[in-house]
Image (tube, grey):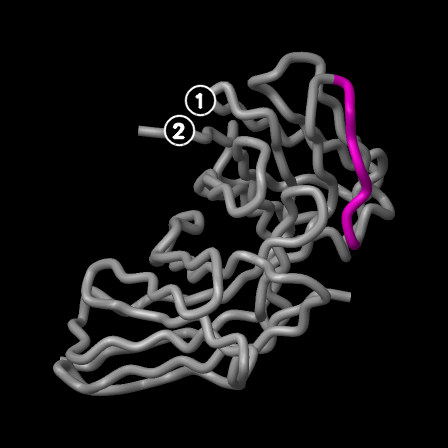
Amino acid sequence: GDSVTQMEGPVTLSEEAFLTINCTYTATGYPSLFWYVQYPGEGLQLLLKATKADDKGSNKGFEATYRKETTSFHLEKGSVQVSDSAVYFCALNYGNNRLAFGKGNQVVVIP
Amino acid sequence: DVKVTQSSRYLVKRTGEKVFLECVQDMDHENMFWYRQDPGLGLRLIYFSYDVKMKEKGDIPEGYSVSREKKERFSLILESASTNQTSMYLCASSFSGVGNIQYFGAGTRLSVL
């Protein structure tokens, strides 16, 4: 079935470093793709989305491009801050309004 | 702002108890969802409702049931709680339609002793 795979393991980096979190997907059709973020002690909130191939979603300095040829939706930010420390989930929309989530990546930004 | 409110942030229950987790949304969304979140497993869908009194099983419905008597409220019921149901439970809601955003509550951390 439709699914999302995120790179394994937490990500630790220094403030102002470049962040990339990899996400690839498997889908029978052309799903919408999402990145959600979960700050400590909170629920998930939408970070950005893209609904068709070559769309770029962006928000708060984060970007991700829907790449149909590589079935990917990698998240990037050029210069992270301590406040970006959170768990990041990639997701795709399938079936009747459902979302399939990746396992999430814990990002820790050190001052 | 969309608001999804879960009735409890933390709950501690005993094995065998019947447990109710409540979720209310204020945006007139058709769809409501219950997930559980476990370390290393991400979010897994338990149940989904697309209208009042309508429901669909998700990926892990065993040991759970749901109730949606009003559009704004979606309840998750653990008929007889077990220790393997200790987890973080997240409720979400959305409008119908492809690509619509799901809005999440803050979560309920349930411990079953």
Kindly report which numbered mark, 1 or 2, lies closer to the viewer in this rendering: 1
Q: Are marks 1 and 2 on the same chain?
A: yes
Whether residue B56 appears in magenta in the rendering, the answer is yes
Residue shown at the point (54%, 61%) measured from the top left: A91
Q: Residue at x 15, y 81 (%)?
A: A15
B25 displayed left or right of A101:
left
* Amino acid type of the residue tagged 1 in the rendering: Met
Q: In which quarter of the image is residue B71?
A: top right
The label shown at residue B27 is 1
The residue identified by callout 2 is B3
Image location (x, y in percent) of residue A60: 20, 60
Kind of residue sitting beneath label 2: Lys
Could you tell whether A49 is left or right of B6 in the image?
Answer: left
The residue lying toward the viewer, choosing from B65 and B111, is B65
The Cα–Cα distance between marks 1 and 2, rounded to whole angstroms, is 7 Å
Viewer-nearest residue: A7 or A43: A7
> Where is the N terminus of chain B found, in terms of image quarters?
top left
Residue B57: x %, y % from top left? 81, 42
Residue at mark 1: chain: B
Q: In this view, does B56 lie above or below A46?
A: above
Residue A50 appears in the picture as rendered: yes
Q: Mark 2 lies on which chain?
A: B
Residue A21 percent location from the top left of the image? 40, 80
Question: Which image quadrant for residue B96?
Answer: top right
Q: Are marks 1 and 2 in contact (CB under 8 Å)?
A: yes
Nearest the eye: B104 or A74 = A74
- Which residue: 63% across, 59% down? A100
- Residues in magenta? B53-59
Dot 2: what SS? loop
Q: Is mark 1 on a helix, strand or loop?
A: loop
